[in-house]
Image (tube, rainbow, N blue to C red):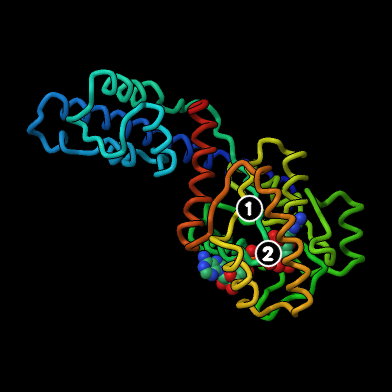
Amino acid sequence: MKPPEVDRVAASRAAVAARRARASVKRAVNERRLSAVAVLDTALSSTESVEATMRVRDLLLSIPGLGPVRVDRIMGRLEIAASKRLSGLGVHQQQRLREFLVKRAPRVEQPEQSRLVVLAGPTAVGKGTVSTYIRENYPEVLLSVSATTRAPRPGEVDGVSYYFIDDDEFDRMVAAGEFLEWAVVHNKSRYGTPRTPIDTALSAGRSVLLEIDIQGARQVKAAMPEATLVFLLPPTWEELVRRLIGRGTESLEEQERRLTTARVELAAQDEFDHRVVNRDVQAAAAEVVELMQIQKAIDLHGKE
Ligand SMILES: Nc1ncnc2c1ncn2[C@@H]1O[C@H](COP(=O)(O)OP(=O)(O)OP(=O)(O)O)[C@@H](O)[C@H]1O
Ligand SMILES: Nc1nc2c(ncn2[C@@H]2O[C@H](COP(=O)(O)O)[C@@H](O)[C@H]2O)c(=O)[nH]1
């Protein structure tokens, strides 16, 4: 076993390296914004240029950290229609766009805040599927592993899907204050989020995703108001029922219990900061990750 001092040194070196990497990303964003100004200038000075035919939306999308949701919001604020090309901008639109590109560059010296995002929603909406997709495709995001007293389903792996623990161990963890939040879900088993991995990841500058129920989401918001709450919705109620039955992991009685909770949970969706409809797993995952980036960018640039 390594002495604690060695661990501390390694952790502090990792934190410095992470800070440097983040500063370098911010520098790249600055550079990309300034080169976007150059594209705008070329387009405005020559209506014959290739740049003149470029859409404003595509120019904004070429800046790292600006995804479609945020770009649409920015264009709304700049009062520029989605289809507008650079050559078609009015004088005031040109001014607003230039001001956005030049003045809103990130401040490199400002420490970046990391993000805690909670993904909740009714049973079988696809929270686990979307979270697993994020874990596999966005390695920069830490997906928290919960502890639960429920029995593993076929294929679930201890330490990956959940920490499967008994009631005594759950009681011990509650008493020791080891959970950031915990709850009895579907009036049956207990589930909780171990606190330490979250604290470690956030202080190392990583984004963290919690896939938990609504009671847990409320507790996290109370303990950490800066957390972002995302509610995952099914395309329709019928599709939700189809997914629950199609998963085939619950008895009829358990399905009924879960659908009863689902009605209550759907009624609470307005408490959440964002809602994402899970029609397609890849698209829903991208939307959740983009919400993390929007929040990061707001932290960096001030309110946008
Ligand atoms: N976009 C989607 N389209 C079709 N099927 C989906 C989609 N997302 C998830 N599913 C399927 O729906 C079922 C339920 O998904 P999942 O187990 O991820 O839900 P969950 O929200 O984590 O449920 P629970 O809260 O009960 O644990 C699974 O069979 C999964 O493959
Ligand atoms: N409050 C918490 N809820 C959690 C946690 N981990 C999972 N969950 C939620 O429980 C239900 C049921 O999950 P299942 O795996 O038995 O289908 C689901 O809504 C999960 O989001 C947690 O740590 N805390």
Q: CA distance from mark 1 to mark 2?
A: 12 Å
* 11 to the left or right of 16: right
The image quarter containing residue 224 is top right
The image quarter containing residue 37 is top left
Question: Crowdedness of circle 1 by 10 Å Cα count: few (<14), some, many (20+)?
Answer: many
Q: Which residue is mark 2?
A: 123
Foreground residue, 168 or 190?
190
Residue 44 x, y percent position in the rendering? 16, 25
Asked if disc 2 is less than 8 Å from ligand 1, the answer is yes
Question: Residue at image x 26%, y 31%?
Answer: 35
Q: Nearer the viewer, mark 1 or mark 2?
A: 2
Residue 80 x, y percent position in the rendering? 32, 30
Asked if disc 1 is less than 8 Å from ligand 2, the answer is yes
- Quadrant containing the N terminus in the rendered view: bottom right
Residue 265 makes an appearance in the image? yes
Position of residue 264 relative to residue 52, above or below, is below
Is disc 2 placed on a helix, strand or loop?
Answer: loop
Outermost residue toward the left?
Answer: 48
Position of residue 295 relative to residue 184, above or below, is above
Residue 297 x, y percent position in the rendering? 49, 35
The image shows a total of numbered marks equal to 2
Question: Residue at image x 88%, y 54%?
Answer: 174
Identify residue type, mark 1: Leu
Please tell me the numbered disc located at residue 197: none
Is disc 1 placed on a helix, strand or loop?
Answer: strand
Residue 196 x, y percent position in the rendering? 74, 50
